[in-house]
Image: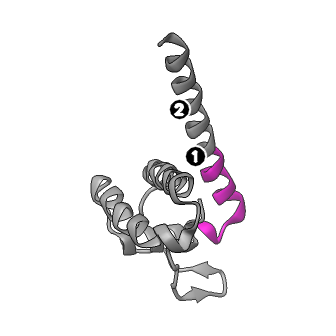
Amino acid sequence: MSLSLFSCSQEVKDNGPEKPKNLISQEAIIPIIIDLQLLESHYHRTYSRPDVYHGALDSASAIVFTDHGVDKAQFEESYAYYAFDIENMYLIYEATLDSINAQISEAGQIQQID
């Protein structure tokens, strides 16, 4: 997912961004990223052009944030904080992709049964 939809503007110190007061834990941010990835994938498959679905995706993303008990600003600050550490962000996305791949595999198995 192109999380560039969420402009991450946070003051950066010499050693990285300041830890947000309301930092979303790594364990909690992964399911949010998964939901956002799946959501954007759906809109992209349906409409193909980001300029067509951007507004709808933004609105739908707000529902994802609400479902996870966070807001967009909290997500953006936490994402920017984690993104500063490339290795850490790699691990977050590795877990995200592993989960999405497991969901796809499970969905494929269900379709074969039907």
Mark 1 lies on residue: 96
x and y percentages locating residue 110 in the rendered image: 49, 18
Q: In what element is the residue under mark 2? A: helix
- Label the magenta part by its dominant secondary structure: helix
The residue shown at (53%, 74%) is 51
Judge by depth and name the residue closer to the eye, 17 or 62: 62
The residue shown at (35%, 56%) is 64
x and y percentages locating residue 25 in the rendered image: 44, 56
Look at the image and say whether residue 6 sits in the magenta stretch. no
Q: Is residue 67 visible?
A: yes
In the image, is residue 64 above or below residue 78? above
Q: Residues within 10 Å of mark 2 (few under 14, many from 20)?
A: few
In the image, is residue 51 above or below residue 28? below
Q: Amino acid at mark 2?
A: Gln
Cα distance between the residues tagged 2 and 1: 11 Å
Q: Amino acid at mark 1?
A: Thr
Instruction: Give the number of callouts.
Output: 2
Q: Is residue 81 visible?
A: no
Mark 2 lies on residue: 103
The residue segment tinted magenta is 83-94
x and y percentages locating residue 98 in the rendered image: 62, 38
x and y percentages locating residue 10 in the rendered image: 51, 84
Q: In what element is the residue under mark 1? A: helix
In the image, is residue 102 above or below residue 14? above
